[in-house]
Image: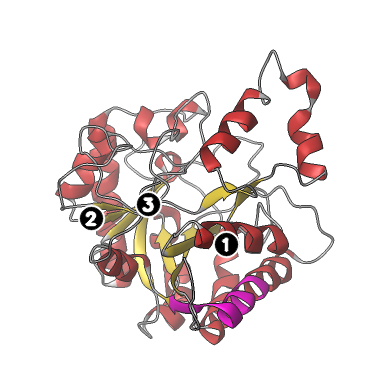
Amino acid sequence: MSTKGSKTPIIFVLTIDTEEEWDWSGPFPQQVANVNNIDKLPAFNDICENLGIRPTYFVDYAVSDNKIAVEKMQTFTTKGNCEIGAHLHPWCNPPYYEQVGEAESHVINLPVEQVSNKLDVLMASLEAGFGVKAKSFRTGRWGIDKNVMALLIKSGITVDSSVYPYYQNEYFSCVGSPTLPYWPDLNEPLKQGKQQTIYELPVTVGFNRTNFELSNNVHVAFAKPPLSWTRFNGLAWHSNLLRKIYLCPELSAAEDMLTLCEKVIDKGYPILHMYMHSSSLLDNQVGLLESDQDPFDFISDAVTKVVTQLKSKYDIEFCTISEAAKKLQTMDTPAE
Protein backbone atom coordinates (compact mmCIF):
# COMPACT_ATOMS: atom_id res chain seq x y z
CA MET A 1 0.00 0.00 0.00
CA SER A 2 1.59 3.26 -1.10
CA THR A 3 1.18 6.57 0.72
CA LYS A 4 1.84 8.65 -2.44
CA GLY A 5 2.57 11.83 -0.54
CA SER A 6 -0.10 11.35 2.12
CA LYS A 7 -0.38 9.11 5.12
CA THR A 8 -1.81 5.64 4.56
CA PRO A 9 -5.22 5.28 6.25
CA ILE A 10 -5.30 2.41 8.76
CA ILE A 11 -8.04 1.30 11.15
CA PHE A 12 -6.76 0.44 14.64
CA VAL A 13 -8.70 -1.75 17.06
CA LEU A 14 -7.74 -2.73 20.61
CA THR A 15 -9.71 -5.57 22.17
CA ILE A 16 -9.30 -6.49 25.82
CA ASP A 17 -10.44 -9.82 27.27
CA THR A 18 -11.87 -8.47 30.50
CA GLU A 19 -11.88 -11.31 32.96
CA GLU A 20 -10.80 -12.86 36.27
CA GLU A 21 -7.18 -13.39 37.22
CA TRP A 22 -5.63 -16.67 38.28
CA ASP A 23 -2.49 -18.74 37.99
CA TRP A 24 -2.70 -20.06 34.44
CA SER A 25 -0.58 -23.06 35.43
CA GLY A 26 -3.18 -24.11 37.99
CA PRO A 27 -6.81 -25.27 37.83
CA PHE A 28 -9.53 -23.12 36.29
CA PRO A 29 -11.41 -21.04 38.88
CA GLN A 30 -15.03 -22.10 39.07
CA GLN A 31 -17.91 -20.22 40.71
CA VAL A 32 -15.50 -18.15 42.83
CA ALA A 33 -13.12 -15.96 40.82
CA ASN A 34 -11.04 -12.90 41.70
CA VAL A 35 -11.39 -9.78 39.55
CA ASN A 36 -8.98 -7.44 41.33
CA ASN A 37 -7.40 -6.57 37.98
CA ILE A 38 -10.47 -4.47 37.14
CA ASP A 39 -9.05 -1.88 39.56
CA LYS A 40 -6.43 -1.18 36.89
CA LEU A 41 -8.84 -0.54 34.04
CA PRO A 42 -9.90 3.08 34.76
CA ALA A 43 -6.28 4.24 34.65
CA PHE A 44 -5.53 2.10 31.59
CA ASN A 45 -8.61 3.42 29.83
CA ASP A 46 -7.37 6.97 30.53
CA ILE A 47 -4.15 6.10 28.71
CA CYS A 48 -6.15 4.71 25.80
CA GLU A 49 -8.32 7.81 25.72
CA ASN A 50 -5.27 10.10 25.65
CA LEU A 51 -3.88 8.11 22.72
CA GLY A 52 -7.21 8.23 20.89
CA ILE A 53 -7.88 4.48 21.22
CA ARG A 54 -11.51 3.35 21.45
CA PRO A 55 -11.16 0.00 23.26
CA THR A 56 -13.50 -2.94 23.07
CA TYR A 57 -13.84 -4.77 26.37
CA PHE A 58 -14.86 -8.41 25.93
CA VAL A 59 -16.35 -8.91 29.39
CA ASP A 60 -16.90 -12.34 30.93
CA TYR A 61 -19.40 -13.42 33.58
CA ALA A 62 -16.94 -13.22 36.49
CA VAL A 63 -16.70 -9.49 35.86
CA SER A 64 -20.28 -8.72 34.77
CA ASP A 65 -21.67 -10.49 37.83
CA ASN A 66 -19.45 -8.53 40.21
CA LYS A 67 -21.21 -5.31 41.21
CA ILE A 68 -18.02 -3.56 42.35
CA ALA A 69 -16.17 -4.46 39.16
CA VAL A 70 -19.04 -3.21 37.01
CA GLU A 71 -19.21 0.06 38.94
CA LYS A 72 -15.49 0.62 38.42
CA MET A 73 -15.83 0.03 34.70
CA GLN A 74 -18.85 2.33 34.50
CA THR A 75 -16.60 5.23 35.47
CA PHE A 76 -15.41 5.16 31.85
CA THR A 77 -17.83 2.99 29.86
CA THR A 78 -20.60 5.55 30.25
CA LYS A 79 -18.54 8.10 28.29
CA GLY A 80 -19.28 6.29 25.04
CA ASN A 81 -15.64 5.96 23.97
CA CYS A 82 -15.53 2.17 24.16
CA GLU A 83 -17.59 -0.94 23.49
CA ILE A 84 -18.76 -3.75 25.74
CA GLY A 85 -18.61 -7.16 24.08
CA ALA A 86 -19.18 -10.67 25.41
CA HIS A 87 -16.47 -13.13 26.44
CA LEU A 88 -17.45 -16.67 27.41
CA HIS A 89 -15.26 -18.46 29.95
CA PRO A 90 -17.14 -21.75 30.38
CA TRP A 91 -15.44 -22.65 33.66
CA CYS A 92 -16.79 -19.66 35.63
CA ASN A 93 -19.99 -18.98 33.69
CA PRO A 94 -23.17 -20.65 35.01
CA PRO A 95 -24.88 -22.98 34.70
CA TYR A 96 -22.13 -25.30 35.95
CA TYR A 97 -22.03 -28.88 34.74
CA GLU A 98 -18.76 -30.54 35.72
CA GLN A 99 -15.16 -29.88 36.58
CA VAL A 100 -13.52 -28.06 33.69
CA GLY A 101 -10.23 -29.37 32.33
CA GLU A 102 -8.09 -28.19 29.46
CA ALA A 103 -10.34 -29.61 26.75
CA GLU A 104 -13.55 -28.27 28.33
CA SER A 105 -12.06 -24.78 28.70
CA HIS A 106 -12.45 -24.37 24.93
CA VAL A 107 -16.05 -23.51 24.16
CA ILE A 108 -16.11 -25.48 20.92
CA ASN A 109 -15.48 -28.73 22.81
CA LEU A 110 -18.64 -28.45 24.91
CA PRO A 111 -22.11 -29.82 24.10
CA VAL A 112 -24.03 -27.15 22.22
CA GLU A 113 -26.80 -27.14 24.84
CA GLN A 114 -24.32 -26.18 27.54
CA VAL A 115 -22.86 -23.38 25.44
CA SER A 116 -26.35 -22.10 24.66
CA ASN A 117 -27.31 -21.99 28.33
CA LYS A 118 -24.06 -20.31 29.35
CA LEU A 119 -24.28 -17.74 26.57
CA ASP A 120 -27.85 -16.83 27.57
CA VAL A 121 -26.72 -16.22 31.15
CA LEU A 122 -23.73 -14.16 30.02
CA MET A 123 -25.74 -11.95 27.67
CA ALA A 124 -28.36 -11.30 30.35
CA SER A 125 -25.66 -10.48 32.91
CA LEU A 126 -23.98 -7.99 30.58
CA GLU A 127 -27.26 -6.27 29.87
CA ALA A 128 -28.15 -6.11 33.56
CA GLY A 129 -24.73 -4.80 34.56
CA PHE A 130 -23.88 -2.43 31.72
CA GLY A 131 -27.26 -1.67 30.23
CA VAL A 132 -26.22 -2.77 26.73
CA LYS A 133 -26.93 -5.69 24.46
CA ALA A 134 -23.51 -6.92 23.40
CA LYS A 135 -23.03 -7.11 19.63
CA SER A 136 -19.48 -8.46 19.61
CA PHE A 137 -18.04 -11.67 21.02
CA ARG A 138 -14.93 -13.73 21.60
CA THR A 139 -14.75 -17.30 22.89
CA GLY A 140 -12.59 -17.93 25.92
CA ARG A 141 -9.29 -19.45 24.81
CA TRP A 142 -10.18 -18.90 21.13
CA GLY A 143 -11.76 -21.12 18.49
CA ILE A 144 -15.09 -21.12 16.67
CA ASP A 145 -17.29 -23.71 14.99
CA LYS A 146 -20.66 -23.83 13.26
CA ASN A 147 -22.57 -24.60 16.45
CA VAL A 148 -21.18 -21.62 18.35
CA MET A 149 -21.60 -19.39 15.31
CA ALA A 150 -25.30 -20.30 15.12
CA LEU A 151 -25.74 -19.50 18.81
CA LEU A 152 -24.06 -16.11 18.35
CA ILE A 153 -26.45 -15.19 15.56
CA LYS A 154 -29.41 -16.28 17.69
CA SER A 155 -28.11 -14.04 20.51
CA GLY A 156 -27.87 -10.98 18.26
CA ILE A 157 -24.08 -10.95 17.92
CA THR A 158 -22.99 -9.32 14.64
CA VAL A 159 -19.18 -9.36 15.05
CA ASP A 160 -17.09 -12.32 16.21
CA SER A 161 -13.40 -12.26 17.05
CA SER A 162 -12.63 -15.85 18.02
CA VAL A 163 -10.25 -16.60 15.15
CA TYR A 164 -6.56 -16.66 16.11
CA PRO A 165 -4.61 -16.95 12.83
CA TYR A 166 -1.77 -19.47 12.56
CA TYR A 167 -2.59 -21.04 15.92
CA GLN A 168 -3.57 -24.56 16.88
CA ASN A 169 -3.18 -26.96 19.78
CA GLU A 170 -4.52 -30.42 20.50
CA TYR A 171 -7.93 -29.01 21.46
CA PHE A 172 -8.74 -26.65 18.56
CA SER A 173 -7.26 -25.13 15.41
CA CYS A 174 -7.48 -21.86 13.52
CA VAL A 175 -4.93 -22.92 10.90
CA GLY A 176 -6.06 -22.09 7.39
CA SER A 177 -8.36 -19.26 8.44
CA PRO A 178 -8.25 -15.90 6.67
CA THR A 179 -6.00 -13.40 8.40
CA LEU A 180 -8.13 -10.46 7.27
CA PRO A 181 -11.72 -9.66 8.31
CA TYR A 182 -14.30 -11.68 6.40
CA TRP A 183 -17.87 -12.99 6.20
CA PRO A 184 -17.51 -16.58 7.45
CA ASP A 185 -19.20 -19.61 6.03
CA LEU A 186 -21.63 -20.60 8.78
CA ASN A 187 -20.95 -24.31 8.28
CA GLU A 188 -17.18 -23.84 8.10
CA PRO A 189 -16.41 -20.59 9.95
CA LEU A 190 -12.68 -20.74 9.14
CA LYS A 191 -13.59 -20.25 5.49
CA GLN A 192 -15.08 -17.26 3.73
CA GLY A 193 -18.79 -17.48 2.92
CA LYS A 194 -21.60 -15.47 1.36
CA GLN A 195 -23.83 -14.73 4.38
CA GLN A 196 -23.79 -11.18 5.76
CA THR A 197 -25.30 -11.62 9.20
CA ILE A 198 -22.16 -12.05 11.31
CA TYR A 199 -18.69 -10.73 10.52
CA GLU A 200 -15.36 -12.23 11.60
CA LEU A 201 -12.57 -9.91 12.68
CA PRO A 202 -9.40 -11.89 13.53
CA VAL A 203 -6.58 -10.50 15.64
CA THR A 204 -3.36 -9.48 13.89
CA VAL A 205 -0.72 -12.22 13.89
CA GLY A 206 2.13 -12.72 11.43
CA PHE A 207 5.86 -12.90 10.92
CA ASN A 208 8.81 -10.64 10.30
CA ARG A 209 8.91 -12.02 6.75
CA THR A 210 6.51 -10.98 3.99
CA ASN A 211 5.31 -14.46 3.01
CA PHE A 212 3.27 -15.38 6.08
CA GLU A 213 2.08 -18.74 4.76
CA LEU A 214 5.57 -19.96 3.96
CA SER A 215 6.88 -18.58 7.24
CA ASN A 216 4.18 -20.41 9.17
CA ASN A 217 4.86 -23.67 7.35
CA VAL A 218 8.53 -23.43 8.27
CA HIS A 219 7.72 -22.47 11.86
CA VAL A 220 5.28 -25.38 12.29
CA ALA A 221 7.61 -27.91 10.66
CA PHE A 222 10.46 -27.07 13.03
CA ALA A 223 8.20 -26.98 16.10
CA LYS A 224 7.57 -30.75 16.08
CA PRO A 225 9.46 -33.98 15.42
CA PRO A 226 11.48 -34.93 13.49
CA LEU A 227 12.88 -31.38 13.14
CA SER A 228 12.27 -29.95 16.60
CA TRP A 229 15.60 -31.30 17.86
CA THR A 230 17.36 -28.65 15.71
CA ARG A 231 15.86 -25.87 17.85
CA PHE A 232 15.66 -23.91 14.62
CA ASN A 233 12.77 -21.73 15.74
CA GLY A 234 14.66 -20.53 18.80
CA LEU A 235 17.80 -19.86 16.80
CA ALA A 236 15.80 -18.15 14.06
CA TRP A 237 14.11 -15.96 16.65
CA HIS A 238 17.32 -14.83 18.32
CA SER A 239 19.03 -14.18 14.99
CA ASN A 240 15.94 -12.34 13.68
CA LEU A 241 15.84 -14.74 10.74
CA LEU A 242 12.23 -15.74 11.44
CA ARG A 243 9.94 -14.47 14.16
CA LYS A 244 6.29 -15.21 14.76
CA ILE A 245 4.82 -11.97 16.08
CA TYR A 246 1.55 -11.21 17.81
CA LEU A 247 0.06 -7.72 17.96
CA CYS A 248 -0.23 -8.24 21.69
CA PRO A 249 1.81 -6.37 24.35
CA GLU A 250 1.82 -9.49 26.55
CA LEU A 251 3.47 -11.69 23.93
CA SER A 252 5.57 -9.40 21.74
CA ALA A 253 7.93 -6.51 22.45
CA ALA A 254 7.00 -3.08 21.09
CA GLU A 255 9.75 -3.25 18.46
CA ASP A 256 8.45 -6.60 17.16
CA MET A 257 4.87 -5.36 17.12
CA LEU A 258 5.97 -2.38 15.03
CA THR A 259 7.75 -4.74 12.64
CA LEU A 260 4.55 -6.74 12.29
CA CYS A 261 2.55 -3.57 11.67
CA GLU A 262 4.92 -2.54 8.89
CA LYS A 263 4.67 -5.98 7.29
CA VAL A 264 0.88 -6.14 7.25
CA ILE A 265 0.51 -2.54 6.09
CA ASP A 266 2.93 -3.25 3.23
CA LYS A 267 0.78 -6.27 2.39
CA GLY A 268 -2.27 -4.03 2.11
CA TYR A 269 -4.02 -4.80 5.38
CA PRO A 270 -6.52 -2.00 6.13
CA ILE A 271 -6.67 -2.82 9.86
CA LEU A 272 -4.42 -3.48 12.83
CA HIS A 273 -6.10 -5.51 15.57
CA MET A 274 -4.22 -5.47 18.88
CA TYR A 275 -5.43 -7.66 21.74
CA MET A 276 -4.65 -8.31 25.41
CA HIS A 277 -6.05 -9.54 28.73
CA SER A 278 -7.14 -7.22 31.53
CA SER A 279 -5.61 -9.64 34.04
CA SER A 280 -2.15 -8.95 32.62
CA LEU A 281 -2.33 -5.40 33.95
CA LEU A 282 -2.17 -6.95 37.42
CA ASP A 283 0.02 -9.98 36.83
CA ASN A 284 1.09 -11.13 33.37
CA GLN A 285 0.36 -14.83 33.92
CA VAL A 286 -0.48 -15.39 30.25
CA GLY A 287 2.45 -13.49 28.78
CA LEU A 288 5.82 -14.71 27.66
CA LEU A 289 7.74 -11.50 28.19
CA GLU A 290 10.03 -11.25 31.17
CA SER A 291 10.42 -7.84 32.73
CA ASP A 292 11.16 -6.40 36.15
CA GLN A 293 8.85 -3.51 35.31
CA ASP A 294 5.39 -3.33 36.86
CA PRO A 295 2.99 -5.18 34.50
CA PHE A 296 0.68 -2.18 34.20
CA ASP A 297 3.55 0.13 33.30
CA PHE A 298 5.12 -2.41 30.97
CA ILE A 299 1.97 -2.98 28.93
CA SER A 300 0.95 0.69 28.98
CA ASP A 301 4.40 1.74 27.76
CA ALA A 302 4.35 -0.85 24.97
CA VAL A 303 0.89 0.21 23.76
CA THR A 304 1.88 3.87 23.92
CA LYS A 305 5.10 3.30 21.98
CA VAL A 306 3.40 1.32 19.23
CA VAL A 307 0.45 3.69 18.82
CA THR A 308 2.57 6.84 18.96
CA GLN A 309 4.90 5.50 16.27
CA LEU A 310 1.99 4.44 14.07
CA LYS A 311 0.31 7.84 14.40
CA SER A 312 3.49 9.55 13.25
CA LYS A 313 3.60 7.53 10.02
CA TYR A 314 0.01 6.67 9.14
CA ASP A 315 -3.48 8.12 9.20
CA ILE A 316 -4.78 6.03 12.08
CA GLU A 317 -8.52 5.79 12.65
CA PHE A 318 -9.35 4.37 16.06
CA CYS A 319 -12.51 2.25 16.21
CA THR A 320 -14.25 -0.16 18.50
CA ILE A 321 -14.57 -3.60 16.93
CA SER A 322 -18.17 -3.04 15.80
CA GLU A 323 -17.28 0.36 14.34
CA ALA A 324 -14.37 -1.22 12.47
CA ALA A 325 -16.57 -4.01 11.14
CA LYS A 326 -19.04 -1.53 9.66
CA LYS A 327 -16.27 0.40 7.94
CA LEU A 328 -14.54 -2.72 6.62
CA GLN A 329 -17.75 -4.14 5.20
CA THR A 330 -17.85 -1.27 2.72
CA MET A 331 -14.22 -1.71 1.68
CA ASP A 332 -12.47 -4.09 -0.69
CA THR A 333 -9.89 -5.92 1.42
CA PRO A 334 -7.01 -7.84 -0.17
CA ALA A 335 -7.14 -11.62 -0.24
CA GLU A 336 -4.81 -13.24 2.28
Measuring 26% from the left and 72% from the top, which residue is drawn there? Answer: 131
Toward the viewer: 254 or 300? Answer: 254
Q: Is residue 43 visible?
A: no
Relative side of 75 to 111, left or right: right
Q: Which mark is residue 157?
A: 2
Secondary element at tag 3: loop
Measuring 46% from the left and 65% from the top, which residue is drawn there? Answer: 1
Q: Is residue 151 above or below residue 188?
A: below
The residue tagged 1 is 261
Q: Amino acid at mark 1?
A: Cys
Quick one: label 2 or label 1, which is nearer the N terminus?
A: 2
Toward the viewer: 253 or 3? Answer: 3
Q: Are marks 2 and 3 in contact (CB under 8 Å)?
A: no
Residue range in magenta is 305-317
Which mark's residue is nearer the viewer, 2 or 3?
3
Residue 101 screen position, x and y as percent: 51, 28
Q: Main secondary structure of the magenta part?
A: helix
Measuring 34% from the left and 29% from the top, which residue is drawn there? Answer: 110
CA distance for labels 3 and 1: 19 Å
Secondary element at tag 1: helix
The residue tagged 3 is 161
Q: Which mark is residue 15?
A: none
Q: Amino acid at mark 3?
A: Ser
Q: Amino acid at mark 2?
A: Ile
Q: Is residue 187 above or below residue 87?
A: above
Secondary element at tag 2: loop
The answer to which quarter of the image holds residue 277 is bottom right
Which mark's residue is nearer the viewer, 2 or 1?
1
Q: Residues within 10 Å of mark 1 (few under 14, many from 20)?
A: many
